Image (tube, grey):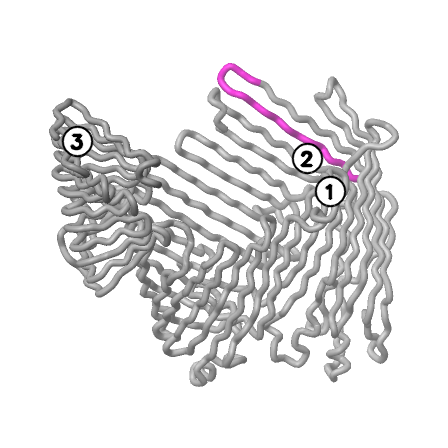
């Protein structure tokens, strides 16, 4: 039977062929011979899942198989497209076979060119192929391989006998290579850390990542430092509800005995365990209400500070005082309740006679706060704040402190609300119950069991917030005068506490021996509220006609009536002009007759160039003498070059001590399908170790490659040297 027509439609009904999808042929010439239908000339095939065109086609109605010949173009679903010389489609299994094909997945932005391929719902199998995500006609990189398979469920591509090419030049061969074409997290190896240290030798850390479920993942970080030792860290991250998440981390590192002895370390083994947990709903599961709450737990237990230093190569410097904490709060529009606990491990004391027993802990601190509100009269205001502190430790003074603060005032507007006046009476009270707060008179100990403090002061606050639009700009102005007049004041605390246990252990008492004393952990009342003073604060902003900020200026100044002295003046200016931002902050001390702090910064941003320079100058005085000066310069820049290159550099310089803390420079190259960075960096930084504080200088060359969608590969060669003890 021969049919000649401009178009022929063939409908495969589900009634006749079960679950086979509906397919339509359009062609210039169609012939049917039994169960075989052939079509030629402008062949077009389309169904729910396919749209294809070819020079000719053949359809086997009995076996539900379609074959396309010559210039075959096929689209499958929303993202898959292909071109080939031959295609075979099994409508029963959705399996497709191609010869001399080119396949692209627009969603993953990756393409495959192969001699032969087989595409099903589960996988794509390919032979004698190349793969890339770059420009098709002239790819910057591609991988040629003998065979491969793309698993559509795991979205992982397996390549066998791959050869890596940059342009047309082969650079590397591997018997096997695999990478994920998906951006979601999955089990596998993460980017390793590789470096060299003069003290530690070759450092290699290889993270192993396990992510089989959405609710949790697990990371193992085994490492080896050839001249120092080996260890392993592990982190379990989890999300136990839509409102909470956390982590559990632990690790151990074993030192070589010769390295421990050379570096005078306290321990041969460094170990620790950590826990973090964050939750936004707790009481909300039990009661309904318009409130917010939050729980945060951060716990750590370790035997010395090197447990933290050895977690990774770029851990930075950790404070020797390691903190665990538990915080919870619940708040409404009018009330706030919070409970906080802090537990410290002073790693510098580990191994000493008293260990961590004389380290002060705060377990817990409880706070209730009633927010600013009105009562009786619409302009009669009040607030209330209460705090409880439990300061505890095994050795040395401890205490329970109760604090209360109540401001009551009138607030009203003046001159049609151009001014706002606030008059208030303020009361602060504190009661401290001490335990083991001992003092020594040269013969016997005596105790101070409690301290009571009451402070009352009057306050007058006058402020205004004005704005006005001009023809060329928009101006806002805010200023306030804050006057404090002390009222009744009674009680104080001792600034120093005696370390009585040192005397009990035989240390001779000497009032001038500062090692026998420590600062009282109970804060004294700030002189802001115990002396008569007035404080001025003003700020103004200028905006152009487009609403863009062009100038910010603020000024702060206080005068102390009791000492008849002007206190420090603070002036801040920010100027925004096109691509240029200028910032300056100055603090001037009238007492020392000198500038105590200057911060100046300049930032320039352009489409092809950006630069930033920042200088900080700080000077501290004691009894009229400058005892601590800081002068620090930091700058960085980047310049976009032709052919997708970018040059960048940065430097941190200590002007006071005349040395370069850090400097780096490098090149960054970026294309759509790949990029790389080559960086040289020198850095000097102090670092807490179990042997004390050391200064380390590191020099390194860092190379980062990112091939989309393969991921990032980084190599860094760093040398640490000039270890010097600072204490």
Q: Is residue 357 magenta?
A: no
In the rendered structure, are the residues bearing label 3 and label 1 in contact, judged by CB atoms less than 8 Å apart? no
Name the spot of residue 108 as percent of width and height, x first. Answer: 32, 45
Is any part of residue 629 visible from this angle? yes
Secondary structure under tag 1 reads: loop
- Residue 455 in the image: above or below residue 254: above
The residue at the point 33 percent across, 55 percent down is: 156
The residue at the point 82 percent across, 30 percent down is: 410
**Which residue is more in the foreground, 220 or 651?**
220
Spatial CA span between label 2 and label 3:
84 Å
Most extreme residue toward the top, as rendered?
471
Q: Looking at the image, tell me whether mark 1 or mark 2 is earlier in sequence order.
A: 1
The numbered dot on residue 536 is 2
Name the spot of residue 659 as percent of width and height, x first. Answer: 41, 60
Name the spot of residue 6 as percent of width and height, x first. Answer: 15, 22
**Which residue is more in the foreground, 288 or 453?**
288
Q: Which residue is mark 3?
A: 43
- Residue 180 in the image: above or below residue 717: above
The residue at the point 30 percent across, 52 percent down is: 123
Crowding around mark 1 (Cα neighbors within 10 Å: few <14, some 14 to 19, many 20+) is few
Q: Nearer the viewer, mark 3 or mark 1?
A: 3
The magenta region covers 469-484
- Dividing the picture into quadrants, the one containing residue 444 is bottom right
Asked if residue 549 lies left or right of residue 107, the reply is right
Secondary structure under tag 2 reads: strand
Crowding around mark 3 (Cα neighbors within 10 Å: few <14, some 14 to 19, many 20+) is many
Q: Which residue is mark 1?
A: 288
């Amino acid at each position: 039977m021969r049919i000649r027509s401009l178009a022929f439609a063939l409908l495969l009904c589900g009634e006749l062929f079960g679950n086979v999808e509906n397919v339509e042929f359009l062609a210039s010439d169609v012939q049917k011979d039994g169960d075989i239908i052939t079509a030629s000339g402008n062949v077009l095939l389309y169904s729910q899942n396919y749209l294809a065109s070819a020079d000719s086609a053949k359809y086997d109605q009995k076996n539900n198989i379609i074959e396309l010949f010559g210039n075959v173009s096929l689209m499958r679903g929303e993202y898959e497209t292909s071109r080939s010389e031959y295609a075979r489609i099994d409508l029963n299994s959705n399996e497709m076979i191609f010869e001399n094909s080119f396949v692209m997945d627009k969603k993953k932005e990756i393409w495959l060119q192969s001699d032969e391929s087989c595409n099903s719902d589960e996988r794509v199998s390919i032979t004698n192929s190349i793969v890339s995500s770059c420009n098709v006609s002239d790819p910057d990189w591609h991988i040629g391989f003998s065979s491969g398979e793309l698993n559509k469920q795991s979205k992982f591509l397996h390549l066998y006998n791959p050869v890596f090419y940059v342009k047309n030049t082969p650079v590397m061969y591997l018997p096997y290579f695999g990478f994920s074409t998906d951006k979601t997290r999955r089990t596998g190896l993460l980017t390793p850390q590789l470096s060299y240290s003069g003290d530690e030798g070759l450092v290699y850390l290889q993270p192993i990542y396990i992510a089989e479920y959405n609710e949790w993942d697990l990371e193992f970080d085994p490492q080896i430092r050839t001249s120092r030792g080996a260890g392993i860290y592990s982190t379990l991250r989890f999300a136990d509800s839509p409102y909470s998440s956390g982590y559990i981390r632990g690790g151990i590192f074993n030192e070589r005995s010769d390295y421990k002895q050379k570096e005078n370390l306290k321990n041969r083994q460094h170990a620790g365990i950590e826990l973090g947990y964050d939750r936004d709903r707790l009481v909300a599961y039990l009661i309904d209400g318009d409130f917010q709450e939050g729980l945060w737990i951060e716990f750590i237990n370790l035997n010395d500070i090197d447990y933290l230093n050895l977690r990774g190569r770029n851990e930075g410097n950790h404070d020797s005082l390691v903190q665990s904490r538990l915080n919870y709060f619940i708040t409404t529009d009018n009330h706030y309740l919070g409970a906080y606990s802090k537990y410290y491990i002073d790693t510098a004391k580990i191994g000493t006679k008293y260990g961590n027993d004389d380290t002060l802990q705060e377990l817990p601190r409880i706070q209730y706060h009633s927010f600013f509100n009105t009562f009786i009269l619409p302009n009669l205001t009040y607030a209330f704040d209460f705090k409880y502190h439990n300061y505890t430790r095994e050795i040395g003074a401890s205490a329970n402190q109760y604090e209360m603060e109540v401001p009551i005032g009138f607030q009203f507007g003046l001159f049609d609300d151009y001014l706002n006046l606030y008059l208030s009476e303020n009361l602060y009270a504190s009661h401290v119950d001490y335990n083991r707060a001992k003092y020594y008179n040269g013969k016997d100990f005596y105790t101070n069991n409690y301290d009571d403090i009451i402070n009352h002061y009057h306050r007058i606050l006058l402020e205004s917030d004005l704005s006005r639009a001009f023809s060329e700009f928009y101006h806002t102005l805010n200023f306030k005068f804050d006057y404090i007049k002390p009222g009744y004041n009674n009680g104080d605390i001792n600034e120093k506490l005696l370390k009585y246990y040192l005397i009990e252990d035989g240390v001779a008492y000497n009032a001038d021996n500062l090692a026998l004393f420590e600062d009282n952990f109970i804060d004294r009342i700030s002189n802001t509220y115990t002396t008569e003073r007035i404080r001025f604060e003003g700020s103004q902003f200028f905006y152009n006609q487009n609403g863009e900020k062009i100038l910010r200026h603020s000024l702060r100044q206080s005068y102390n009536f009791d000492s008849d002295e002007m206190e420090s003046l603070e002036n801040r200016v920010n100027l925004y002009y096109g691509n240029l931002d200028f910032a300056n902050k100055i603090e001037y001390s009238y007492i020392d007759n000198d500038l105590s702090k200057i911060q100046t910064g300049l930032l320039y941003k352009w489409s092809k160039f950006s630069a930033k320079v920042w200088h900080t100058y700080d000077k501290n005085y004691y009894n009229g003498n400058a005892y601590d000066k800081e002068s620090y310069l930091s700058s960085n820049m980047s310049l976009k070059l032709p052919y997708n290159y970018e040059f960048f550099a940065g430097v941190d310089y200590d002007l006071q001590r005349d040395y370069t803390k850090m400097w780096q420079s490098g090149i960054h190259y970026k294309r759509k399908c790949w990029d790389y960075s080559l960086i040289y960096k020198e850095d000097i930084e102090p670092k807490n170790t179990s042997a004390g504080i050391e200064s380390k200088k590191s020099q390194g060359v860092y190379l980062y490659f990112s091939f989309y969608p393969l991921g990032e590969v980084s190599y860094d060669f760093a040398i640490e040297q000039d270890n010097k003890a600072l204490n």
